[in-house]
Image (tube, helix red, strand yellow):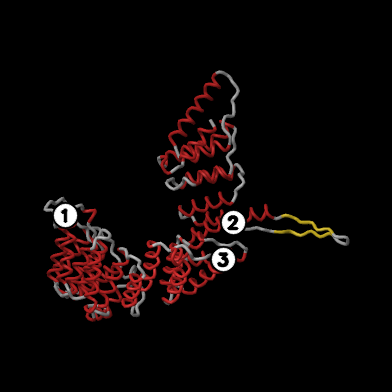
Amino acid sequence: MHILAAASGEAGDAVSAKRLLDLLRKQQMNDQSKGQERVKVLNIVDCGYLCKALVAPSAGGDSSFLEAVSFMETMQGEWGVMPDAQLCTILLSGCHGASSKHEKRIHEFVVQNDIDVNDFLAAALIRVYGRAEDIERAVAVFTAQQQRRQRHDTAPTTTTSTTTTTTTTTIHATPTVNVWNAIIRVHVARPSVGGAERAVALLNRMDAEGVRPDRATFLPLLPAVGKTRSLTLAKEVHTHIIKSDITIVDSRFASALINMFGQCGPIVEATNVFREFLQRRGSSLRKNESVWVYNALLSAVSNRKEDSAAQVLALYDEMLESGVPPDRATLAMALSACGNIGAKELERGKEIHRRVLDGRFPINEFVETALISMYSKCGSLEDALAVFDNHQRRLLGISSSSKTTRPPKQEETTVCVWNAIIGAHGDHGLFDQAMSFFHRMLENGVAPNEVTFSTVLAVCAALGSLPQGEEVRAIMTQHGVPINGFLVSGLISMYSKCGDLDQAVAVFDKWRLYHLLPWLKVRFAPPLYTTMFRN
């Protein structure tokens, strides 16, 4: 019986675990009917294995998890086995698809039965409440664990000498790093309420209490700090990394650190991390790892305003000279840089396009979008159209060696390619053709998004065509696209340039309490500003 329980748990075999439980229940029912004394057939280890099987990812989701919770609540009565912290931790690991009320049942069971909460169980409870976005309970669990550790780890130490006897108290009242990591993750998952700042404050507390962070502490923290755009926070986190003696030797960690500095400050900080990583790893660095860190720095450089396109292409050339093969993300960034520079980089863009056509990796919609945008910005609308036509042929399954076709799968078609070709015609002043592509897009069953409508509204404004602008607005309503500041701005611009100032004011009045961005468009429509000021 013990072997079967262990085997089902290690294999994550919920079916075998359920059969074993059914067998044990039937056996106990038979024993009760015969008036025999109940025999304890399972111990806490066996129950842990069975719960592990019931909450395994392949177990069947919520139903198996509920059966595991029910088993935990009844095992004490049926087998005389009291659940411990390890078993509760196993159950909480299977909470991903469960509702919060089932998770709370486990916590309530822990409290009611006065189960000693170790750091593993505390971390699991914090993660559960973090997923439920119940930050108050997560913080409460963390605080309770700190207090519990203080009670358990406070021990009087008596020192006796020939003259005096002294008693000192040594306190190690802080949870282990996995508990700190759990509460930090809860905070960084809430960036809109200062989660990154609070997480860094927790990092400072860790340092003050003598807990050394590990890689798992920083991996979720780095992107959260990057989103704050705060160089001060970024440097503070980097200081903690150095102080913790964490050597940046894995590409995932290095890429996250590069991305953080790329978002927060001068590119020199991100470049220093990049160079240090390459120097440290040297020849031991695998090709795919090199691509990740190069792409991280390319992305960081792309976000700069000053000479970013030239720097991207210089880094791209360095990457090729180092023998690191670019991937699709690399090529998309290089193509974008060519487009930003303009016509003089057209040949470089074509060289990158040839590399794509070499077939070293499958082409996708994101590379095609970058190609269309690059050719358009470099002045070659003909080449942009050729890329778009090849995109359509690829979706139809037409190749140069085959005349067979297959129906296009709409899930394969991404709206970004259509947005690029519509925008390309708009940029070249071919507004009627841009509107034609928009209608073709609708006929092909491709749902437009906010980028599509923002582009098409600008085209209608350039045409000065109020009927087409009204039609676009009706289509936007029909597709249920959420109205945000960019679309409100586009509507105001379209109505003002088409001469309907009353409607432009009406749009502004409807959304001014929710969006500030339309104010930016007012300055481009002086008659509208005068009307509003007069009113």
Indicate the amino acid at tag 3: Ser
Residue 61, above or below 486: above
- Residue 120's place in the image compared with 234, above or below, is above
Marks 1 and 2, the one that precedes in the sequence: 2
Question: Which one is nearer the viewer's eye here, 289 or 102?
Answer: 289
| Above or below: residue 371 compared with residue 411 | below
Earlier residue among tags 3 and 2: 2
Query: Along the horizontal axis of the image, is 472 left or right of 192?
Result: left
Nearer the N terminus, badge 1 or badge 3? 3
Q: Can residue 195 be seen in the rendering of this structure?
A: no
CA distance separating discs 1 and 2: 57 Å
Q: Quadrant of residue 362?
A: bottom left
Mark number, residue 244 = 3
Q: Which residue sits at x=39%, y=65%? A: 290
Specify the label residue 176 is tagged with: 2
Camera-side residue: 393 or 436?
393
Residue type indicated by callout 2: Thr
Circle 3 — which element? loop
In front: label 3 or label 2? 3
Q: Is residue 201 left or right of residue 163?
A: left
Tag 1: amino acid: Leu
Q: Can residue 286 be seen in this view?
A: yes
Judging by the rendered image, the residue that carries numbered circle 1 is: 396
What residue is shown at x 58% (from left), y 45% (from top)?
A: 85
Q: Quadrant location of residue 34?
A: top right
